[in-house]
Image (cartoon, helix red, strand yellow):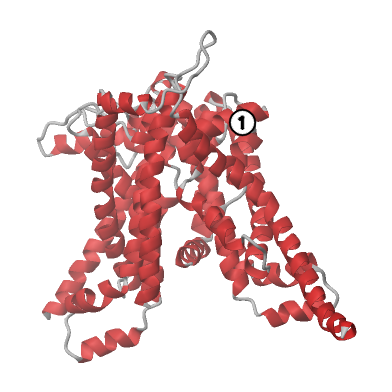
Amino acid sequence: MPDAAALSASPRRARLAFAGFAAIHGWLLLLPAAVLLVAFTHYPTVRTLISSLYSKGTSMRPARFVGADNYAAMIEDPVFWKVAFNTFYFALGTIPASIVLALTMALWVNGKLAGRGFLRLAYFTPTILPMIAVANIWLFFYTPGIGLIDQMLGLVGLSGRNWLGDPDTVLPSLIVMTVWKEAGFFMIFYLAALQAIPPELKEAAMLEGASRWTYLRRVLLPLLMPTTLFVLINAVLNSFKLVDHLFILTKGGPNNASNLLLYYIYETAFSYFDAPYAATLTAVLLAILAVLALTQFLVLDKRVHYR
Amino acid sequence: MNPNRFSRSLEGAAAWILALLWIAPLLYALWAAFHPPEYATRFDLSAPLTLANFVRAWDFAPFARYFLNTFVLVTTILAAQLVLSTLAAYAFARFEFPGRDVAFLLVLVQLMIVPEVLIVENYRTMGQLGLIDSILGIGLPYMASAFAIFLLRQTFKTIPRELDEAARIEGCGPLGVLWRVYVPLAKPTYIAFGLVSVSHHWNNFLWPLVITSSVETRPLTVGLAIFGAPESGVDWSMISAGTLMAVAPLLLAFLIFQRQFVQSFMHVGLK
């Protein structure tokens, strides 16, 4: 009897030993990346949430726990509400416009138009330029009086205005530039999706007598839905993390009319040196991103069911 | 002319007008950079061509140093990303270990919580590590890339296990298999990710701005932002020349390898 038990145990022990090796190898392979990810993503995320519960320490008085005081101060801060409003305005202004343009561009580049190569090049080029360089160039367009836009308006007898200095026009001006910068990037995802759609579908639709518009509405758009959702999530993420142009064009002005959440966080931390309040604002941004991540998770789930 | 053909040519015209509108800012920058400042706002075809703006821009700011910094930064980040994400993706794709699925979810968190969002706390960490105002400090938060790990894991999973087992029978250890089987077969993914990573970090601005404070570490984008600041006087021709210099390497690479760039962005977007 003991002999039989030993016989049956040894291959199992060997298997267990092998599984142990695999586990150790797996973790060792993962370790270098995991250390950096924890150090610069997870740890600072947790630290942000903790810092937002403490007061600002000085050399005389160390930081102490204040509970939700920073959040209460945030609710009372008119600049925060201004910035939150701007951020949503900016997102609403850039996202639908860039998605519609991106889809249109992709349909054109994927079609049989003359000079497709050039079209694709022209649409995509803004994507590989740094936002800082783009802002340098666009600053000149928007400059009052001598700027390109005012000069063109002058040609048709209209008077120009201070595009970036006027609270009414500053955000729309930034939105136009951002749409220009991003549409070509999102075009790529639509292009990839369009190229994966079999041409037989189009032939079948045409045989049935469907117009191109009907084909677009009834066949292409539903098929492109997963791409649209993917692009949408990325566009929302971009609208929260992209503030480079503010450094060149407006510095958030005039009077915070173009200030966005991430830029306000930067100002709070590195111009006003108020780390706890910067952490509080970051916590809000993290909450928004968490909601976005959950949406994506559920959406991706749907995408699987869809197929 | 039948209505269908008419609507098509109308569409063609619209597509071309949009394309011209889309490259107009770049064309304008070229115009301003290659003509004397007095022609910056006057579009006169007889305007003389000149390189003087580039010479002035080059003398005005330490561009050579900025180029070197950006080059070192982009190469360091890419090299680290490739090594770290290859190892991690291999672990996720081919090893069974406790906590693997949770670990993978934790990695994916970085897709949403990008390093830009955490500048305040990461600045503090860099201070504790003594890495403020260093190129390593700029690069460190980006070296473990969830995006690269995800892409490579997807690619590694499509590689048949038979190849893996054959290599093991030949006497390869786990790292040998990775190097001889997985890495060569994932070459298109490496190229695609490499191009996307280089263009991203060549253009990245916010975190480098926060963490650098000297000419010796500043990358091109940060240098360019100082350069375009109003204090340097509004000299559009010189700013255009400087801006073009900063984007030239990436732009030229893109124009030459256009197809490869677009394919890479598509490849990366599809996963």
The chain holding disc 1 is: B
Q: Quadrant for residue A110, please give it.
A: bottom left
The x, y position of residue B221, in whole percent, is 50, 36
Q: Nearer the viewer, residue A44 or B250?
A: A44
The x, y position of residue A284, in whole percent, is 37, 37
- Horizontal side of B9 relative to A34 (left or right) equals left
Q: Amino acid at mark 1?
A: Met
Q: Nearer the viewer, residue B62 or A301?
A: A301
Q: Is residue B243 above or below residue B153?
A: above
Which residue is at 29% across, 39% downward?
A87
Label count reads: 1
Please, which residue is most extreme toward the bottom here? A207
Q: Is residue B210 above or below residue B198?
A: above
Please, which residue is most extreme toward the right here? A3
The x, y position of residue B265, in whole percent, is 48, 61
Q: Is residue B197 above or below residue A253?
A: below
Other-residue count near label 1 (Cα within 10 Å), few / some / many at <14 / 14–19 / ≥20 = many
Please, which residue is most extreme toward the left here? A157
In what quadrant of the picture does the N terminus of chain B appear? bottom left
Q: Quadrant for residue B139, please give it.
A: top right
**Mark 1 element type:** helix
Residue A29 seen in the figure: yes
Q: Nearer the viewer, residue B80 or A214?
A: B80
Please, which residue is most extreme toward the front here? A1
The x, y position of residue B181, in whole percent, is 72, 73
Which residue is at 58% across, 27% downward?
B62
Which residue is at 17% across, 78% downward?
A214
Kindly identify which residue carries mark 1. B126
- Horizontal side of B232 relative to B101 (left or right) equals left
